[in-house]
Amino acid sequence: MQDFQDKIICDDCIKVLNQVRSPFADLIFADPPFNIGYKYDKYHDKKEKEHYIDWTRKWMIACCNVLKPTGSFYIAIGDDYAANVKIIADALGLFMRNWIIWHYTFGQQTKDKFARSHTHIFYFVKDKKNFTFNDDAVRTPSDRQLIYNDKRANPAGKMPDDVWDSFMPDDVWDSFPRVCGTFKERQGWHPCQMPERLLARIIRVSSMEKGWVLDPFSGSGTTAVVSSKLDRHYTGIELSSEYAAESRKRIKEFGKSAIEGESPIKWTKQLDTELKQLYHENKIPTDQLDDHYYLLTRFTEMFNNYIGNKSNIVNQIEIKKRLKQLRKSGKLGALHGEKPQTIKAS
Ligand SMILES: C[S@@+](CC[C@H](N)C(=O)[O-])C[C@H]1O[C@@H](n2cnc3c(N)ncnc32)[C@H](O)[C@@H]1O
């Protein structure tokens, strides 16, 4: 089994996993083709319904057989087959802990029905009493902490809910934008890449450092690259030799850097200029932005829209810090009618 560790295997996942004799995976994340006609390099994504359901059962069984008794199993799936996945999981004795909805904007446009803008992510465990759940690793700041400065707030923050949104204007920590064309993390050679931030939440909460994460439909290698970044072992299985080769390169290049969208922003001259410009257009002094979280959040949201790069979302803390630095160095400039801004070094 060690042969599989930290590898992207190019093969059919059912074939590979059926050869394994003992469970090894602490966490499985599966994002199979949804049978909606996506254009993959090798896989044909438009099968007969019964064939697809039968195939889904087979790979889910193969995954269950390699999942440790304390393991967690996440499955991303579209509307058409979500119910089938749940029925198969029940029959396999899996216990559902959450039925997560990942809601995103920039979905496909439609004329004759409502536009599709979500994906289902099932969160199952094998043993409902014995599993890994690192809540502290995924808590986000609560309104009580951020807005109301309420002393009763849990200092560790709040648990996110089961709808994961692409962009929460009031909560950049809780935002999971889809990987769009202009995003820095986008690997142009794969049609449906998952965002690193989304995988990071799942891997952090449901596995320990040095634990083993399996992705039977590895695609562009997102699960593997994020596992490597978070110091977990990984195995990815991918049918296409081109995707497998490209994802190995991706892991080599980025496997030790920060999670995309979480990395502290590099304040280039251009970004500073845009920040100053927005600040002067917006006309809200820094002390008010400091004191009113709501204003800071709106400003942060405007800035993210302004720079138009949501793969590297700037959060409120970074904005606040940068405005303070610019102000301290006298580079921010006073707002119209305001006294020149200088602040003492803290
Ligand atoms: C929805 S994509 C996965 C995308 C991935 N989550 C990412 O972030 O890049 C599904 C992938 O499964 C692969 N695939 C299809 N059938 C497979 C099989 N039987 N075994 C392994 N991989 C398969 C396809 O080539 C495709 O790259």
Image (cartoon, rainbow, N blue to C red):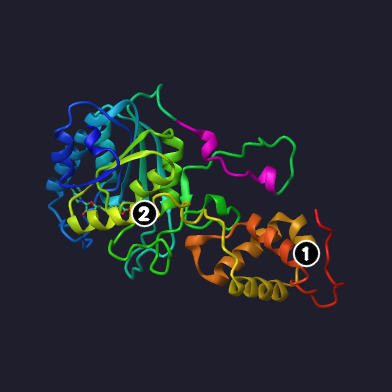
Q: Which mark is residue 132?
A: none
Instruction: Give the extent of the magenta segment.
Output: 133-146
Q: Secondary structure at mark 2?
A: loop
Residue at 79 percent of width and 61 percent of height: 287
Of badges 1 and 2, the one in the foreground is 1
Q: Is residue 340 above or below residue 152?
A: below
User: Farthest right residue?
Assistant: 339
Q: Which image quarter: residue 40?
A: bottom left
Name the spot of residue 131 as percent of width and height, x first: 40, 26
Residue at 15 percent of width and 34 percent of height: 18
Residue hosting label 1: 328
Residue hosting label 2: 194
- Which residue type carries mark 2? Met
Q: Secondary structure at mark 1?
A: helix
Which badge, 1 or 2, comes first in the chain's sequence? Answer: 2
- Check residue 144 for magenta coloring: yes
Q: Is residue 101 visible?
A: no
- Which residue type carries mark 1? Lys
Name the spot of residue 95 as percent of width and height, x first: 34, 29
